[in-house]
Amino acid sequence: MKLIRKKITIHGGNELFILKPCDISKSVTAGHDNKGFVLIWGNGSGYQFLAECFSIAASLQKNEILYIPIRYCPSDDFKETFNGFEYNYNIVCVNYCETQISLKDIEEILKIKIYTEETIILMPDVNTEYIDRWKTNRRLTVKIHRTNMYISTNRDGFHSLSRGACNLTEYGDEFINDYLPHMHYDWHENTSTSVGITLYYWHDK
């Protein structure tokens, strides 16, 4: 996967790196229902993209953040089916074992206009093996803040999300009637404000 890698100098002279995929799927969107239920929607192609993104997130190094700006154009059918939901939140992935940084600081960092950048290529190793639950329990935090969805977990957590996204690719890009496959990730959250995330298959008619 080709990514833009931005290097930003923050307070104390520390450096932080933001990775952004060059080719972002237009078949993915992220949001919530205003009641704490958080979702990512996508078709088979969208979930192939996400499987690779979560795989890369599993390998984030110290002070690296994966930033995925979302620009999904919803159909009337989508808006009718998910009436009352907010969507098109950008996805921000942080490996909490490597990068200890607050949401407030990330928000400010994403606004910084002075940086250097380079194009890099990372080869995602999409996980297809089941991750033991004890490796992920209480190790996932998902929060919505302003226009971003923050997903913070460890290497095993992102590999598990990558596996789930990969499993949803098997449904392809054709409309499925009367059944919408989905996968829940809650893992007994470690915060009272995060209820996990649901990967939800969706394809327009």
Image (cartoon, grey):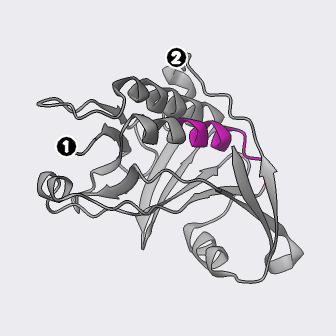
Q: Nearer the viewer, residue 63 or 5?
A: 5
Q: Image point 15% across, 53% down: which residue? A: 77
Task: Answer above or below: position of 173 versus 69.
Answer: above
Who's the residue at 52% across and 63% down the image? 69
| Amino acid type at image mark 1 | Lys
Q: Is residue 187 above or below residue 2?
A: above
Tell us which disc is closer to us: 1 or 2: 1
- Residue that numbered label 2 is attached to: 130
Tell me if residue 164 can be seen: yes
User: Label 2 sits on what residue type?
Assistant: Tyr
SS for dot 1? loop
Magenta range:
51-62
Give the left or right position of residue 95, taking residue 186 as reference: right
- Verify whether residue 39 appears in magenta: no
Q: Dot 2: what SS?
A: loop
Using the rendered view, name the quadrant where residue 167 is placed. top left
Left or right: residue 77 compared with residue 146: left
Mark 2, other Cα within 10 Å: few <14 / some 14–19 / many ≥20: few
Q: Is 176 positioned to the left or the right of 48 in the image? A: left
Q: Earlier in the sequence, mark 1 or mark 2?
A: 2
Question: What residue would you read off at disc 1?
Answer: 205
